[in-house]
Image: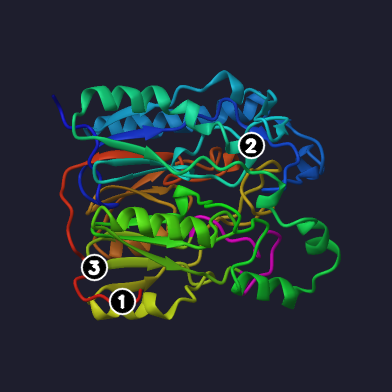
Amino acid sequence: MPKIVNCWNEWDPLKRVIVGRPEGTNMTALEPGWRYNKPEGGFPLGSYGPFPQELVDAANKQMDYFVSVLEQRGVKVDRVVVHPCMFNKPVSTPDWTQLNCYGINNPRDVFLCHGKYLIESAASQRSRYYEYLNLRPLFEQYFKEDPELVWFTTPKPRLTDESFVRNYYYYFDNVWTDEEKRQRLYNWEFQVTEKEPLWDAADAMRLGKDIFIQGSSVTNKSGVDWLKRMFAELGIRVHHILVDSTPPRNVPGSYHPRHIDANLVSLRPGCMMYHTHHPVRTPEFWELFKKNDWQLIPAVETTFSRDDNITLGDFPPGAVIGPMNTFSIDSKTVCVEAHEKEYSEQLDKLGFEVVPIPYEKVIPFGGVLHCTTLDIYREGKMEDYFPNQIEGY
C-alpha cells in the first residue's frame, strides 16, 4: 500500500497537496470568537451571508490556474469536498447555535500535517466548528490507503460562553486605550479565555524535529500547552513565539495577530524570512536560530494594495497582507502572489525560482497561497535543524 502522508517541513519536494474552494464562504454571523464588520462591502456589524457569486467565480478561476501550475510540475492535487452546511445554514451543538459557517477556502487554518500525523486543531470560532466535515472524505481515504498514517484530533472544544471574555469587543471599541490594547497583546490576552485548549493550525510552522507555534488571538496558552505535551510524546519539540503586530501602522485588526504564515516563512534549511512590521518578541526564538546558524532575513515591504470591499481577513480594504504568504514546490522553487514584485525580486537574488501566481481575487476569502493549501506529501524525512537547543524553550 502506498505512503500518502509525509510532510516534515515547508520546502521538501512537493508530491501531493490539498487545495481549498471558495464555494460556501460566508461573512460570518456574530459570535464571541471573532467579529466581522465590513459595511463598505454590504456587511455592517450584525449582518451576514454568502459572498457574491461573481467573487466566487473570480477566485475559482485563479485557484484553478494555481492547481494547473502545480499539476504541470507533477504534483497531485486533491480538492476539498464542500459540505452542505457551509452554504449559509445555521449549525448548533447542545451549548449554542451559530447562524452560519466560515467556509473551507483555507484548509491550512484548522488542519496540520506533520510527518505521518494528520491533526485537526481546536478552532476558537463557532463558525469553524464543523469545518472538519469538508476534509473528512479525503482523510478517510488517506487512512484506508496509507497504513502508516496516524490521524487524531485535539479534544473538541465546547466553545461555551466560558471560553470567551465577556463583553470583550465592547471594551475594545469603547473603553480600552491604544496603550491598554497593546499591553493586552503583549500579555497574550485576547477574546478567548484559558477555559479549554484552543489553537489554529495556521499558527504552526513545521521544521522537522521542531514546530514553532504562534500565540495569538486564536491560539491560547492552553492550546500551545496541549501541543507541547502531545508532540513531546512523539519526540517532536514545540516552541511558542509572540509577535508585536501593532507597529508601525495601527490599522484595524492589528491588535489581534493570528497565523504565523503572515509573519514568518522558511524557504530552505537555514533560511528564514520575517515580517519587519510584525517583529517576534520572544528572545529565545532569535537566540535559538542564531545558535544553529540560521539566516534570518527581513522581507521587503510590499507595495501591493487591494481595492476589495469584502474580505474575511483581519485587515481593511486597501491594506496589505504581507508578501511572505507563499507556497514552496521545493527548496529552490517558490510560488508567490503575482503582484508581489519586490518580494519576488528579493527571492530571485537569494537564488530561488519564483513562480508568479495571480491570486488577488482569492485574498478576500481569507488568505493567500499558503493559507489555501495543505501539503500532504513531500519527499523527505524528519531532520533536526536545531541540534543546539535552549534549555526551557
The residue closer to the viewer here, 118 or 51, is: 118
Q: In the image, which disc is placed on residue 127?
A: 2
Question: Marks 3 and 1, how far apart in space?
Answer: 12 Å
Q: Which residue is mark 3?
A: 270
Q: Alpha-carbon distance for marks 2 and 3?
A: 38 Å
Q: Which amino acid type is marked by label 2? A: Ser
**At x 53% / y 56%, what residue is drawn?**
219
Eye-nearest disc, 2 or 3? 2
The amino acid marked with disc number 1 is Leu
SS for callout 2: helix
Q: Quadrant of residue 357?
A: top left
Label 3: element kind:
loop
| Label number found at residue 288 | 1
- Dot 1 falls on a residue whose secondary structure is helix
Can residue 123 be seen here? The reply is yes
Q: Nearer the viewer, mark 3 or mark 1?
A: 1
In this figure, which colouring scheme has been used for the structure? rainbow
Q: Position of residue 122 (x, y in %)?
A: 51, 45
Front one among 172 and 368: 172
Which residue is drawn at the image coordinates 52% and 62% (left, top)? 221
250 in the magenta segment:
yes
Taking the spot 76% from the left edge, 45% from the top edge, the residue there is 38
Q: Say which quarter of the image contains residue 78.
A: top left
Q: Is residue 42 left or right of residue 18?
A: right
Could you tell which of marks 2 and 3 lies nearer the N-terminus?
2
Residue 310, given in percent of the width and then of the height, sits at 69, 41
In the displayed orientation, state which residue is furthest to the right. 174
Q: Crowding near pointer 2: few (<14 within 10 Å), some, many (20+)? A: many
Q: Name the N-terminal-most of marks 1 and 2.
A: 2
Kind of residue at disc 3? Gly
